[in-house]
Amino acid sequence: MKVAVVGATGMVGNVMLKVLEERNFPLTELIPVASERSVGNKIEFAGKEYEVVGLETAVSMKPEIALFSAGGDTSLEWAPKFAAAGTTVIDNSSAWRMNPENKLVIPEINADLLSAEDKIIANPNCSTIQLLMALKPLHDAYRIKRVVVSTYQSITGTGVKAVKQLENEYAGAQGEMAYPYPIHRNALPHCDVFQDNGYTKEEMKLTNETKKILGDDSVNVTATAIRIPVVGGHSESVNIEFERDFDEVEVRQLLNDFPGIKVQDNPGVNTYPMPIYAEGKDDVFVGRIRRDHSQPNSLNMWIVADNLRKGAATNAVQIAEYLIENKLV
Ligand code: 2RA
C-alpha cells in the first residue's frame, strides 16, 4: 500500500505523519509531497528516511491513497490528477466538501456511504467534526431543530504564521502578522473571510457541513467563530433545540456510548473539557451538559477537541483505515 501525504511539511501534514505512525497504518511505502521549495528534504517516518517529492512525481508513483492538506487550490488542481491515476484522495481542504458528488465523512457517523467509486473524499472542517460527533447521537434520539454554536478556536487552525505571531507578541517582538490585530490578550471574532451575509466562511462551514453530514437540510445552525490565543484545540459552546423532549441521564449515556466521545462533566470537582487536556488526544470531550430552562426541549453543552488530530489528521486517517478494512481501495 503506497500512501502519499500531500502537504507533508505543513502543520496538519506533520500530524498526519505522526498519526499514521502511531496507528501502525498498513503502508509499504510513504510518499511525502510538498511544494517545490521542499523537494529533496528528508523526513523520518517509522524508523526510515524518506525524500520529499513534488506533485508530478507523486502522481506518477500511483499511490493507492493520498491524504491531502495543502490548501484548496492545490486540491482543486491535483486531486483529480491523482484520482485519474487510480489514487483515492482524502482531502482536508474545503475544496470538495460541498460538492454533491463528493462524500463528506466522519467515520463514526457516515463512513457507510463510501464506495470504491469514491475517488475524492472530503474531510470536514475541524470545528464541524467535533460538533457533529456530539450532535449525531442526540439528533438520532431527539431530532435537532436548531443549533446555536459559538466556537473558541486555536491559532493552530490558522497555521504556523499564527503560532509565530503569538510567540512574538509574548516576547514583545515584531514580526509577520497572521491576523489583522494582536492575538495575545485578545479574542478575534474573525475566522476566515467575511461574506455578504455578515457571516464568515468558517461560520457558514458549520451551517452547511452539518446539514450535509446529517443528511437533513431542516437542521438549522447559526454560528459565531472566535479566534483565541490557545494552541491545544478548539472549544465550542453549543445550544441545541430538539423536536422532542429529552432525558438528561439518557443524553449523557448516548454521548458516552458514542465511539470517539468522552463525557467529562462533574463541575462540582472542576471536571470539564479544556484544550490543555484535549491536546494530543483523538477523543471529542463533552461537558457542561445542562438543560436550557429558557426554552422547551433545549440543551447546553461544551465540546473540546484537538483540531489538528480528530479535527483533521486523525479523521482523515480513520477514513483511510475504513477504506482498507472494507476493501474499497
Ligand atoms: C481554522 N478550521 O481553524 C479552520 C481551518 N483549519 O482556521
Image (cartoon, rainbow, N blue to C red):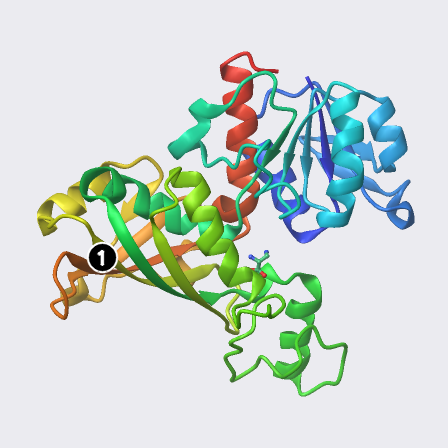
Position in image of residue 21 (x %, y %): 60, 32
Position in image of residue 154 (x %, y %): 52, 64
- Above or below, 261 against 278 in this view is above
Q: Is 176 on the left-hand or right-hand side of 144?
A: right
Q: Nearer the viewer, residue 17 or 301?
A: 301
Position in image of residue 129 (x %, y %): 45, 47
Residue at the far bottom: name it: 172
**In the picture, residue 193 is in which quadrant?**
bottom right
Q: Is 117 on the left-hand or right-hand side of 78?
A: left
Which residue is under mark 1? 241
Position in image of residue 55 (x %, y %): 85, 36
**In the picture, residue 214 is in which quadrant?**
top left
Which residue is rendered at x = 60% and y = 68% of the image?
195
Q: Is 164 on the left-hand or right-hand side of 305?
A: right
Mark 1: secondary structure: strand
Dot 1 amino acid type: Glu
Which residue is rendered at x = 23% and y = 36% of the image?
257
In the picture, the quarter occupied by the C terminus is: top right
Q: Nearer the viewer, residue 194 or 174?
A: 194
- Any part of residue 44 in sight: yes
Which residue is rendered at x = 50% and y = 69% of the image?
230
Disc 1: residue Cβ within 8 A of ligand 1's nearest atom: no
